[in-house]
Amino acid sequence: MSIFALIASAVLIVIAAIHLLWALGYWWPITDEAALARAVVGTRGITRMPGAAPTALVTVALMFAAAWPWLPPSGLRTAGLVVIALVFQLRAVFAYSPWARAMTPEQPFRRLDETRYGPLTGALGMIYLVLAATTTEGF
């Protein structure tokens, strides 16, 4: 199952790196801050990216999630994999909920959330569930 761990970690490291760029005030891949905020946050009327602190916290959380599959087999590792899987699955479900549509109506975020962000987080959630189910030591 290390191929799943490798895929999940590589994807999350790339996403964490992008969030780190944003935390440092580097707007990529869209150089206009308002357009980037509409693409990656999507809340009604957004014109600015979130601040450095919350974006850096997301970076740290993503890095922990990327590293977690590589911990030695243990109950803690398994429990963490399950929690990470649930967080990603909840994020995927959020992308398609009426509440999300009302909370994040800005385009292109709404389209990207339903066609890219939601499916990606759903796939990551499934990978983490597989990793949790195939760990050599249980709870």
Image: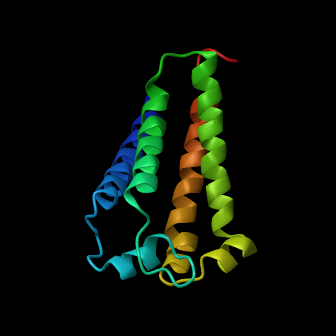
Please determine whether, in this image, residue 91 is positioned above or below residue 60.
Answer: below
Q: Residue furthest right?
A: 98
In the rendered image, the quadrant that contains the C terminus is top right
Q: Residue at x 60, y 45 (%)?
A: 126
All told, the count of numbered labels is 0
Horizontal side, residue 59 vs residue 117: left or right: left
The picture quadrant where one finds residue 127 is top right
Horizontal side, residue 135 vs residue 62: left or right: right
Please determine whether, in this image, residue 106 is positioned above or below residue 129.
Answer: below
Q: Residue at x 41, y 75 (%)?
A: 48
x%, y% of residue 95? 63, 67
x%, y% of residue 71? 47, 21
Q: Residue at x 73, y 72 (%)?
A: 99
The picture quadrant where one finds residue 38 is bottom left
In this orientation, which residue lies closer to the viewer: 33 or 130?
33
Q: Residue at x 48, y 42 (%)?
A: 61
The picture quadrant where one finds residue 119 is bottom right
Colour scheme of the picture? rainbow
Horizontal side, residue 11 vs residue 46: left or right: left
Please determine whether, in this image, residue 59 is positioned above or below residue 33.
Answer: above
x%, y% of residue 23? 34, 57
x%, y% of residue 47? 43, 81
Please say whether residue 126 is visible from this viewpoint.
Answer: yes
Please say whether residue 1 is visible from this viewpoint.
Answer: no
Horizontal side, residue 119 vs residue 103: left or right: left
